[in-house]
Amino acid sequence: MSNNGDNLRSLTFSYENGTAKFTVLDQLALPHETTYVAIRNIEDAWDAIRSMRIRGAPLIAIVAVLGLAVELTSNAKTVKELDGLTGGVEEVKAFVFQKMDYLKTSRPTAVNLFNAMEELKGIVDNADNTSREDVVNSIVTHAQYMLERDVSDNKAIGSHGADDLLARHTHPDGVRVVTICNTGSLATAGWGTALGVARELQRRNKLRSIAALETRPYNQGSRLTAYEIMTENMPNPCLICDSMAASYIRAKGADACVVGADRVCANGDTANKIGTFQLSIIAKEMGVDLV
């Protein structure tokens, strides 16, 4: 099973004959090298998250749950430890929950990670598990579901976002987009969130241009978003420094600043980092949509 199919892959995952295989794209090597690193156990998953070999809130959660699936099915040491448990299903659950707690320490501020672990714990607690195999299968099955769900959710975000922008911007060539940070395939299991809107516009031949801010100090825009834009041949691409946004919009024009958020509340409030704050003020002052 692959995760994204029709665009850049942040990871690959397969599960056949009781064995899981899992790799992640090493984002620290981008844009100069495209290298996939094997995740063979939860220590590898923990390190990939902690070292920022992978990043992006949705992807962090997915890597953790898939790493747990690999740990329980394909790590010989863990399989042997499971074989040695004699206390029944409750002991197996306690063993698994301890590994979930370990994965949470990879990024203590990652809400998606904690939510994913709690969701997975609920599945294990509520499933009709009567054996160690049942517990492991419930985890692997739900981890695969979470992988597919993330891609599906992202495509829905892209579709709704594109519909909204095209309803308000009717130029025959489409929409001019500015974005910051990385919110694409490399931040998720596939397709992306904010950059997924641009990707959907491109799919409809309605993306007129796209500019990415470099996003200091970690340069997610210049290292990752620009890589995605160029790899997927988005039209009229431009990479600009963070302080150039206002000048770029005045000179080249923009219809929408499409950005991600670290937190989105049920009432519509959002929170993100300082670069997005700057871009939101520029968008308001220059009459550009902020999405």
Image: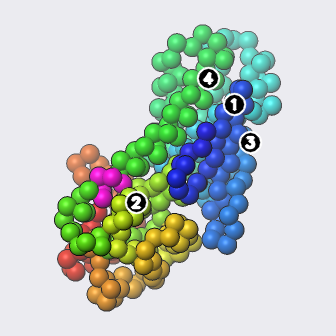
Badge 4 marks a residue whose secondary structure is helix
For residue 153: magenta? no
Please tell me whether mark 1 or mark 3 is closer to you in this view: 1
Badge 3 marks a residue whose secondary structure is loop
Which amino acid, mark 3? Answer: Arg
The x and y percentages for residue 116 are 49, 38
The x and y percentages for residue 10 are 58, 54
Magenta stretch, residue numbers: 158-162
Q: Can you tell which quarter of the image residue 78 is in?
A: top right
Question: Colour scheme used in the picture?
Answer: rainbow
Please tell me whether mark 2 or mark 3 is closer to you in this view: 2
Identify the residue at image location x=70%, y=55%: 36
Q: Name the residue under label 2.
A: 203
Tag 1 or tag 2, which sits nearer the N-term? Answer: 1
Which amino acid, mark 4? Answer: Asn
Q: Distance between the residues labelled 1 and 4?
A: 12 Å
Q: Mark 4 points at which residue?
A: 137
Q: Can you tell which quarter of the image residue 177 is in?
A: bottom left
Q: Distance between the residues labelled 4 and 2?
A: 37 Å
Tag 4 or tag 3, which sits nearer the N-term? Answer: 3
For residue 159: magenta? yes
Q: Name the residue under label 1.
A: 16
Tag 2 or tag 4, which sits nearer the N-term? Answer: 4
